[in-house]
Amino acid sequence: MQALSFIATLDWAIVAVAAFLAGLVRGFSGFGAAMIFMPPAAAILTPAVAAPILLIVDGLLTLPLIPSALRRCNLAEVAQVAIPGVLAAPLGVYLLVTLDADLLRIGIALVVLALTAALASGWRYRGQPHRAVTVGTGVAAGLLGGAAGLSGPPVILFWLAGQSGGAVVRANMILFLAATGIGSLVSYLVAGLFTNQVFWYALTLFPIYGAAIWLGAQGFGLASEAVFRRVAFTLIVLAATTSLVL
């Protein structure tokens, strides 16, 4: 497949728009890219193609965010959920390669809508973070991450209930997603999901996603968080419902 043979197609254009919007949210908040990218991309390309594309593009382009995140994060909090998340990721990848593509695509869209509703409603995990809850959150994130790149939402629902400020939670999320991304990377390699189609899409989406992440990161601390959250939730809901229609 040659790059120019599919860049001009409607399929590529839809995926590119999803990548740009996902990058904006990722750069600003530190998470949320998969909630925007995966529903439409999975509908166009199947989940088994969309998930490795996002892993490559997001993993490489968010590397510059890690040094700053290391200075601001709470490493103990990250490790407590990242370790079970990494261990659970292979099972999520197994679901990705064995479940029916249409069933998984619909499941991704519905999970995204449910998680968005939970985030938008202000619901948070309440109570002391017991070890079982912490490990369970990490496992759930790893499963969703391996199957659909959706490892962020379960953890953000858990962490936002704590006492850490927004900057610390954002830094935690950046490191957590980097750690679970490594687990998914190994599992995708073993499953043979890195195809030529995946690499061509990743190559052509790099500048789009990269520019969007930069713009989103510039907006962090400048834009109103309340306004941004409303816009982000709207984009996520539109992405998920569009996936169901497609």
Image (cartoon, helix red, strand yellow):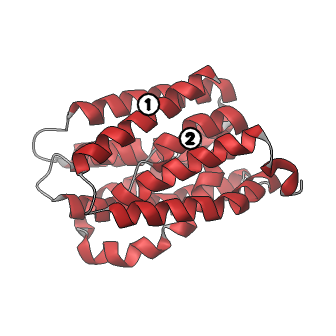
Q: Disc number at residue 90?
A: none
Residue 235's x, y, as percent? 44, 37
Residue, disc 2: 38
Q: Residue at x 72, y 62 (%)?
A: 203
Q: Residue furthest top?
A: 245
Q: Amino acid at mark 2?
A: Met
Secondary structure of the residue carrying numbered label 1: helix
Q: Is residue 114 left or right of residue 110?
A: left
Q: Residue at x 38, y 42 (%)?
A: 232
Quadrant hosting residue 133: top left
Residue 146's x, y, as percent? 54, 47
Question: Mark 2 and mark 1 in contact (Cβ < 8 Å)?
Answer: no
Relative to 86, does residue 158 appear above or below in the rendering?
A: above
Q: Is residue 91 visible?
A: no
Among the two numbered marks 1 and 2 on one chain, the one whose residue lies closer to the N terminus: 2
Q: Amino acid at mark 1?
A: Val
Residue 145's x, y, as percent? 49, 47
Residue, disc 1: 237
Quadrant hosting residue 210: bottom right
Secondary structure of the residue carrying numbered label 2: helix
Crowding near pointer 2: few (<14 within 10 Å), some, many (20+)? Answer: many
Q: How many marks?
A: 2
Q: Is residue 127 left or right of residue 188?
A: left
Instruction: Please state, as top left, top right, bottom left or bottom right, where the C terminus lies in the image.
Output: top right
Relative to 87, does residue 49 appear above or below in the rendering?
A: above
| Nearer to us: label 1 or label 2 | 1
Q: What's the CA distance linking mark 1 and mark 2?
A: 12 Å
Residue 56's x, y, as percent? 62, 61
